[in-house]
Image (spheres, rainbow, N blue to C red):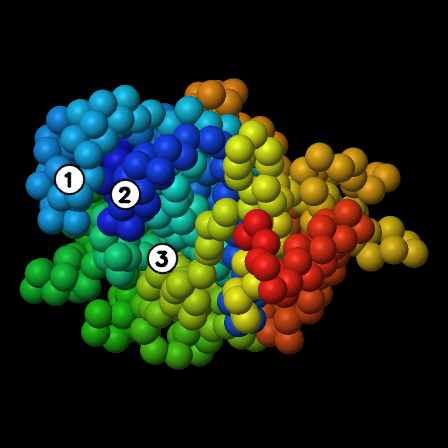
Amino acid sequence: MSPSLPPSLSTDLYELTMMAGYYVAGMRASATFELYVRELPRNRSFLVAAGLEQALEYLEALRFTPEQIGYLRGLPMFEPVPAAFFDEYLPAVRFTGEVWAVPEGTPVFAHEPILRVTAPIGEAQLVETALLAMVGFQTSIASKAARVVHAAAGRAVVEFGSRRAHGTEAACLAARAAYIAGCQGTSNVEAGFRFGIPVSGTMAHSWVMSFEREAEAFERFYGLYGGRSTLLLDTYDTVAAVEALGRTAMRPRSVRLDSGDLAVLSRQVRAILDAHGLTGTQIFATGDLDEHRIAALVAAGVPIDGFGVGTALSTSKDAPALGAVYKLVSFEREGRLVDTMKLSEGKHSYPAAKQVWRLRGGPKSPARDVLALAAEPGPPGARPLLERVMEGGRRIASPVPLASIREACRRALDELPPGLRRLDRVEPYPVTLSDPLRSLTERLAARAQEPEGTDQ
């Protein structure tokens, strides 16, 4: 986040109208919200948490400039709001709260908090929209990338989706999320610059078409980049292009196939390359690929060494809206803590601040998670997933290197039960409630049915 561009208006209007309402009502006490996903997208059996780094950057940069405050003051909605809200409260707003979060790269499941925010209620409310956008988007892309990488079965996957992403910032952050989940690199140069992700590129059909002869296009490109070159074969005739390449002295690092029957063409191209002694030249495939097409190619034993995946990855095409939510789970009222929950059909929530405990599977017990109250001890042998990452509005530790996040993600995915990694026939993962959390949930639900109401 640039310090010259405070992100405080990166929110929905209703966050600010509620913030003003809390101010007028004199509500300054602490509240706790949790960010999670109610239901996993179709054909997903897990998600990969991502976006925490950008969320913490946002929280540390939170403030209102005089220009932003002037804009808000002029909105018709805020006409009834006292001047002190604009003159005294908003200029002093900073995020002063505490954040607990699941480390980036960690597999998570439905109803498990990815992030927990405790702060004065106005602050905690204001940040809802931005946190959902940041964490929800990158988690969506990382989850998709994990499926694509798994389908590739050890062959390289490069994120190629910038031109199909929903804006340039989304493109850059999609590359980051994809790298966390196992992609070897990206075509996005800004992501390489900002995050140190390896960048990769080939050539476009326009390069080949801008020369009178295809062979000249290859020669000029190879003359500049030599053995680093990747030559695009399918502008006119793939087989004719690779035959012509084989008759030259060029030894490109790889050739790219972008259309046609990739299974048939890759075998033809491999045979021609090998016949001309180009055994070290790899075959890289692109062209509307996703995890299902890649899995089919791998199952067919095609001689493709790597895949570039664009639209399906950078937009999480089959599940573009993750449906993350940010719900109030407890707040202070008149000096006492009140736990709260939502009972709407299909949108219920669990009360109180929570922790997720993960138990690794053994010979006689399957791997499982336990959703528990934050204050209660975990089951024997379990490890907590949420860690305190911010206190008093400031990070507790330095940012984790992206390479370390990526490696931790790889290990965590390898530990998942094999059935969870399938692309179809989703296998459920057991997430149970602790006895204290179940008891609290039942007690609050029963109280909500009483005629005189409850503390909800």
Q: Nearer the viewer, mark 3 or mark 1?
A: 1
Helix, strand or loop under label 1: helix
In the image, what residue occupies the spot 92% across and 56% down? 364
Where is residue 297 shown, x and y percent of the image?
51, 72
Q: Which residue is mark 2?
A: 16
In the image, what residue occupies the spot 78% across and 36% down? 377
Looking at the picture, tell me which residue is in the foreground, 23 or 119.
Answer: 23
Mark carried by residue 307 = none
Q: Which residue is mark 3?
A: 314
Q: Dot 3: within a 10 Å radius of its alpha carbon, few (fewer than 14), some, or many (20 or more) residues?
A: many
Q: Which residue is mark 1?
A: 72
Amino acid type at circle 3 is Ser
Question: Are discs 2 and 1 less than 8 Å apart at CB?
Answer: yes
Q: Nearer the viewer, mark 2 or mark 3?
A: 2
How far apart are the two marked residues, 2 and 3, measured between alpha carbons? 31 Å
Helix, strand or loop under label 3: helix
Where is residue 153 shown, x and y percent of the image?
59, 59
> Does residue 399 appear anywhere in the picture?
no
For marks 2 and 3 on the same chain, the one whose residue lies earlier in the sequence: 2
Looking at the picture, tell me which residue is in the foreground, 37 or 256.
Answer: 37
Query: Residue 201, relative to residue 54: is it above or below?
Result: below
Helix, strand or loop under label 2: helix
For marks 3 and 1 on the same chain, the one whose residue lies earlier in the sequence: 1
For marks 2 and 1 on the same chain, the one whose residue lies earlier in the sequence: 2
Amino acid type at circle 1 is Leu
Residue 208 placement, left or right of 146: left
Amino acid type at circle 2 is Leu
